[in-house]
């Protein structure tokens, strides 16, 4: 249809499936079909091209959608939070929706304070065609361009949160007779450890419901997916879980040392957090609170 109706403009249209939705991560299954289940794809164009042929392109896409309706009766409604993005969108609008700005981050603050899951959604899926290269260029910058100082700051923050929640507060909450607080501490440990694993792989952690699934595909520390899920779901004693937390922290310390991020040998992660932060070159980032990031 694009070749037939848009001629030379085809080379200016990026086409793919990136953004919100389990199908963009490759995790779609039968359960996913209860909402936002449509046949479709996404077309990204520049602001200039939006003025030139954007309306005509959207009309052509909507006609195509009518020709290929969803299969079956169920699961075709939209979730307000799902916000299906199929159809035509400017490149700047796409990235602004996900990141809050119209392209790759332009300063360390945007890199540091934009949630990792937002970066994950902006770079997942597949681009089928992008002759112009603008959309893909932004995508590659996000995937490979995080400043090392920012990564170190995020890792330092995760390390101190892991120490506080898992190595320190989990058992203390149990001894205080506060099992609910202990469960929250354990959840904080798991969440921060998962984010640490992605940072050590130089990847972005997706939204929480896909974290364990995505972790299984990482090149390093992929076994943490099962180990962290077991911490949350296994009815083992608090002492057994505390011992498992220490085992996982020891593996993290080993990886931090392997990557040259810390020169400490402590079993407790908090000293490693300060060691990691001391290696940050940018003065402004290095002087941030240890838990920031």
Image (cartoon, helix red, strand yellow):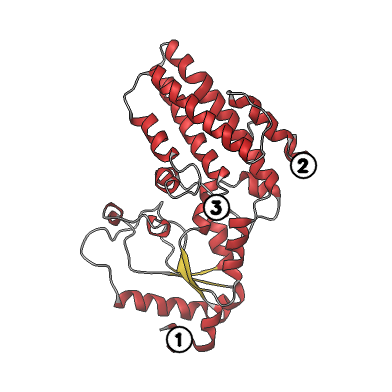
Which picture quadrant has residue 85? bottom left
- Horizontal arrangement in the rendering, residue 121 relative to residue 290 (left or right): left
Would you say residue 293 is visible in this rendering?
no
Query: Which quarter of the rendering shows the C terminus?
Result: top right
Give the image location of residue 144, x and y in percent.
62, 56
User: Can the viewer see residue 100?
Assistant: yes
For the point 58% across and 23% down, the residue is 268
Q: Position of residue 6 (x, y in %)?
A: 48, 86
Q: How many other residues sit within 10 Å of disc 3, few (<14), some (14-19) or many (≥20)?
A: many
Label 2 SS: loop
Identify the secondary structure beneath mark 1: helix
Tell whether 126 sits left or right of 293.
Answer: left
Cα–Cα gap, marks 1 and 2:
50 Å
Calculate the distance from the C-alpha at mark 1 to the C-alpha at mark 3. Answer: 32 Å
Q: Earlier in the sequence, mark 3 or mark 2?
A: 3
Q: Which mark is residue 3?
A: 1
Which x, y percent locates residue 142?
60, 57
- 3 and 2 marks in contact (CB < 8 Å): no
Q: Residue furthest top?
A: 176
Instruction: Work out how far the residue at label 3 is from the one at label 2, CA to CA, in angstroms.
Output: 24 Å
Residue sitting at the far left: 73
Q: Which residue is mark 2?
A: 281
Mark 1 or mark 2, earlier in chain: 1
- Left or right: 84 in relation to 14: left
The local secondary structure at tag 3 comes to helix
What residue is disc 3 on?
Answer: 119
């Amino acid at each position: 249809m694009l070749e037939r109706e848009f001629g030379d403009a085809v080379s200016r249209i990026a086409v793919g499936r990136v953004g919100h939705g389990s199908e963009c991560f490759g995790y779609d299954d039968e359960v996913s079909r209860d909402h936002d289940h449509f046949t479709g794809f996404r077309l990204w164009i520049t602001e200039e091209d939006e003025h030139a042929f954007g309306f005509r392109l959207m009309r052509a896409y909507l006609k195509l959608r009518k020709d290929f309706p969803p299969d079956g009766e169920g699961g075709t409604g939209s979730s307000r939070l799902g916000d299906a993005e199929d159809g035509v969108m400017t490149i700047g609008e796409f990235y602004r929706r996900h990141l809050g700005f119209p392209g790759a981050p332009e300063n360390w603050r945007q890199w540091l304070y934009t949630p990792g899951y937002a970066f994950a959604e902006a770079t997942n899926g597949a681009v089928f065609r992008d002759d112009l290269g603008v959309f893909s260029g932004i995508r590659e910058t996000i995937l490979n361009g995080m400043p090392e100082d920012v990564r170190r700051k995020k890792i330092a923050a995760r390390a101190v949160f892991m120490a506080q929640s898992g190595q320190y507060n989990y058992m203390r909450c149990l001894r205080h007779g506060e099992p609910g607080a202990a469960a929250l501490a354990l959840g904080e440990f798991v969440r921060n450890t998962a984010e640490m694993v992605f940072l050590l792989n130089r990847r972005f952690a997706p939204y929480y419901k896909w974290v364990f699934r995505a972790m299984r595909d990482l090149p390093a520390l992929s076994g943490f997916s099962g180990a962290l899920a077991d911490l949350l779901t296994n009815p083992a004693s608090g002492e057994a879980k505390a011992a498992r937390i220490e085992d996982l922290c020891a593996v993290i310390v080993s990886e931090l040392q392997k990557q040259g991020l810390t020169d400490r040998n402590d079993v407790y992660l908090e000293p490693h957090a300060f060691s990691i932060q001391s290696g940050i070159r940018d003065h402004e980032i290095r002087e941030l609170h240890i838990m920031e990031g």
